[in-house]
Amino acid sequence: MEGTAVPGRLTWQVATVTAARSETPSVRTIELDVPSWPGHRAGQHLDVRLTAEDGYSAERSYSIASAAGEGVAITVERLDDGEVSPYLTDELRAGDQLELRGPVGGYFVWEPADGGPLLLAAGGSGIVPLRAILRQRERSGSDAPVRLLYSARTRSEVIYRDELETHHDGVAVVYTLTRERPADWAGYTRRVDRALLAETAWPAGKNPLAFVCGPTSFVETVAGGLVALGYDPGRIKTERFGGTGGR
Amino acid sequence: MDELDGNRAAGLLREIFGREMTTVAATCASCGAVAPFGETDLYPGGPGTVIRCRTCTSALVVITQIRGMSCVDLMGVRALDE
């Protein structure tokens, strides 16, 4: 039956928006009250379905932005020619309802028992599932050491900036900007390449576990670079999306 | 459109197969490469959803949904394993 979650079955249900806040001019985090949410793991997704009055519907998959045990939240980047994202970033208000199903996915998932050290590499809004992993680590009291490498086009496009700049023991954040060189910027200002990975990533000898999320070109560069540095390919999880310059 | 990967089809695959599939390994019928669906390439924009082998680009799975019916073509998969 639609709207009632049966264990093991994936059903569409109606969630209510409890809060929405802007992260950057084109990115918004939407917190949702989902009546029968079975719980999720850091890195999983949910599917959103929008249905027009004429019955046309569109579905999109979004990474869940919150840790296991926290309320459900997604962070959405507006794609100007998108069918779904402009509604989520520009129109949706607290109190509005939204059809969704989930959680889904089990591949790009980190659990505290997986340990570390963790190398997290984000391109643009690829930070979203990695933020869920960071929050999961914090929430679980895990002491797995983390290096986060975050590539954004400009400083104003860095998502979760305040949260990431709050110091957390064992978490080092390295930024790089690819389209801007602010005078007072302490991070890198170039595209991630093998040399940058060699400077910033864990040495392969520490047997790190890597999660890489971003546009395809970013993911391929980072994953290929890590393998070249000696990382075990079986410990590099990747997730690609068409978010930047795509839909 | 930029390509996506099988992780973005987790919901659709679970709807079809009734279980989590992104960690299930598919053996490509064309080239024999074995990879979990999380490491396949996904093309969701056409009339159906096409999941391709990342090694040889052959279509592994094609799913078309219309009027509440799902048509699933698994001809490109030789085997599915945990």
Image (tube, coloured by chain):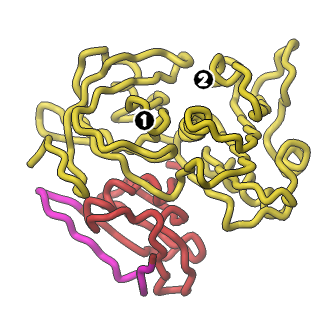
Query: In front here: A157 or A236?
Result: A236
Chain A drawing hue: yellow
Query: In front here: B12 or A26?
Result: B12
* Quarter where residue A89 is shown: top left
Residue appearing at x 38%, y 24% in the figure: A31
Chief secondary structure of the magenta span? strand
The subunit carrying tag 1 is A
Identify the element where label 1 is drawn. loop
- Contact between labelled residues 2 and 1, with CB atoms less than 8 Å apart: no
The numbered mark, 1 or 2, whose residue comes first in the sequence reads: 1
Q: Residues within 10 Å of mark 1 (few under 14, many from 20)?
A: few
The residue under label 1 is A69
In the image, the segment drawn in magenta is B65-81
Q: Position of residue A193 (x, y in %)?
A: 83, 48
The subunit carrying tag 2 is A
Q: What amino acid does circle 2 point to?
A: Tyr
Residue A159's place in the image compared with A140, above or below, is: above
Q: Residue A160 — which label?
A: 2
Residue appearing at x 20%, y 49% in the figure: A11
Left or right: B15 in relation to A74: left
Q: What letter labels the chain drawn in red?
A: B
Left or right: A231 in relation to A209: right
> Disc 1 or disc 2, which is closer to the eye?
1
Q: What amino acid does circle 1 point to?
A: Gly
